[in-house]
Image: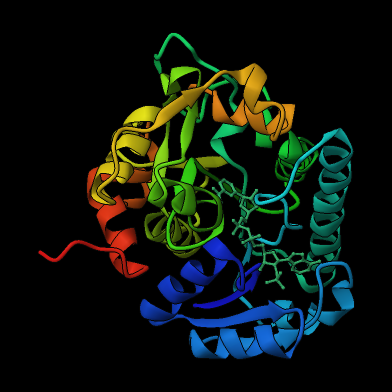
């Protein structure tokens, strides 16, 4: 299979490239400059210099592909996300998607695998299991994706393209928010959950998310959405306490929302207290996906090992 990927230099995207290349596929990836191009080459992909803002830069690469994966997104996860940023990133994501669809209108349709996130399905404080049939209710970081999720649904409903949206849960791994924001605080014993951390979070290891993207690209199942979450959504506290214990630290502290809002935005706060006991039954059944890290108890030690903080066996 010949795959073209946008966002293949990001946290999830690099793992997706690795998964595709590892399965023997030929991968071309969009790179914003020579440094990123070199990274894609290291991962075994062929880079094309360009930008999601300028579709002419990648039209030829798209034409040569059989499947497209879009993980391109302006950076936000390690920044303060205010209302202005929600609007501007939302608009940017839609523009990237429109650009892609316009080029595909010219070069011909093919399956497109895109990303959403489980926070588009709202808050479920009762703790009930939900799946991809849940209604939309965009919360926290999910609000950044509202416009683009609705756009992809329109494209799919109009029969323009077979679009499959992967809905990752809270993706942890050796990068992004976990490495940059959480791990340093955990190591120092300064990490805190919010309001006791009793909310249920659908965690998933980044390598397992990458496998969902790979399988969806290979099989192009005729569904609109597939959640990528591990087997056991757990409380934010259970996850953080486990990581803390692995690092030789005591259980984490807790902070009240009102206090945490001094250093984080209301949008981010909403994400931190969201409840979502999301099922992975569809990914397991339709894609035959078998998560390597079925729970955080297997996944977190692997991440610490990867960043050189693992315990000797
Ligand atoms: N991480 C999570 O927990 C999580 C969970 C659910 C959903 N998601 C969603 O998944 C997506 C990817 O997340 P991530 O954590 O992998 O993000 P990331 O590490 O920030 O990666 C973003 C990627 O997009 C690329 N990019 C940004 N602007 C671009 C542009 N104008 N043209 C082309 N490429 C551009 C970046 O390229 P450069 O390398 O050149 O910067 C990078 O490859 C986001 O939409 C995020 O909301 C993330």
Taking the spot 76% from the left edge, 79% from the top edge, the residue there is: 32
Q: Quadrant of ligand 1?
A: bottom right
Residue 17 shown left or right of residue 305 in the figure = right
Residue 9, image x, y percentages: 61, 73
Picture layout, residue 19 above or below residue 137:
below
Picture layout, residue 230 above or below residue 260:
below
Q: Tell which of 21 and 182 is nearer to you.
A: 182
Residue lying farthest top?
Answer: 126
Residue 236, image x, y percentages: 41, 30
Residue 123 shown left or right of residue 282 in the figure = right
Residue 55, image x, y percentages: 86, 72
Residue 131, image x, y percentages: 45, 27
Q: Tell which of 204 and 281 is nearer to you.
A: 204
Quadrant in which the C terminus appears = bottom left
Image quarter of residue 308: bottom left
Query: In the rendered image, is residue 277 in sight?
Result: no
Query: In the rendered image, is residue 262 in sight?
Result: yes
Image quarter of residue 46: bottom right
């Amino acid at each position: 299979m010949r795959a073209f990927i946008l966002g293949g230099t990001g946290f999830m995207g690099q793992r997706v490239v690795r998964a595709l290349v590892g399965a023997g596929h030929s991968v071309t990836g969009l790179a914003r400059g020579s440094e990123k191009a070199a990274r894609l080459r290291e991962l075994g992909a062929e880079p094309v210099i360009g930008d999601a803002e300028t579709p002419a830069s990648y039209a030829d690469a798209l034409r040569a592909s059989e499947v497209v994966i879009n993980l391109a997104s302006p950076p936000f996860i390690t920044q303060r996300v205010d209302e202005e940023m929600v609007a501007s990133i939302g608009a940017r994501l839609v523009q990237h998607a429109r650009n892609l669809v316009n080029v595909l209108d010219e070069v011909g349709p093919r399956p497109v695998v895109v990303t959403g996130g489980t926070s588009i399905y709202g808050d479920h404080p009762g703790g009930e299991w939900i799946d991809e049939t849940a209604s939309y209710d965009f919360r926290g970081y999910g609000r950044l994706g509202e416009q683009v999720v609705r756009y992809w649904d329109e494209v799919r409903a109009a029969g323009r393209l077979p679009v499959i949206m992967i809905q990752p849960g809270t993706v942890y791994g050796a990068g992004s928010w976990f490495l940059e924001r959480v791990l340093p605080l955990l190591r120092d014993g300064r990490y805190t959950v919010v309001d006791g951390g009793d909310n249920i979070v659908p965690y998933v290891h980044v390598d397992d998310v990458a496998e969902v993207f790979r399988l969806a690209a290979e099989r192009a199942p005729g569904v609109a959405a597939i959640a990528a979450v591990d087997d056991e959504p757990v409380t934010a506290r259970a996850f953080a306490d486990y990581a803390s214990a692995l690092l030789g630290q005591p259980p984490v502290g807790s902070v009240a929302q009102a206090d945490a809002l001094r250093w984080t935005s209301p949008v981010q706060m909403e994400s931190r207290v969201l409840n979502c006991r999301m099922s992975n039954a569809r990914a397991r059944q339709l894609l035959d996906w078998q998560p390597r890290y079925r729970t955080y108890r297997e996944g977190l030690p692997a991440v610490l090992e990867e960043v050189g903080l693992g315990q000797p066996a």
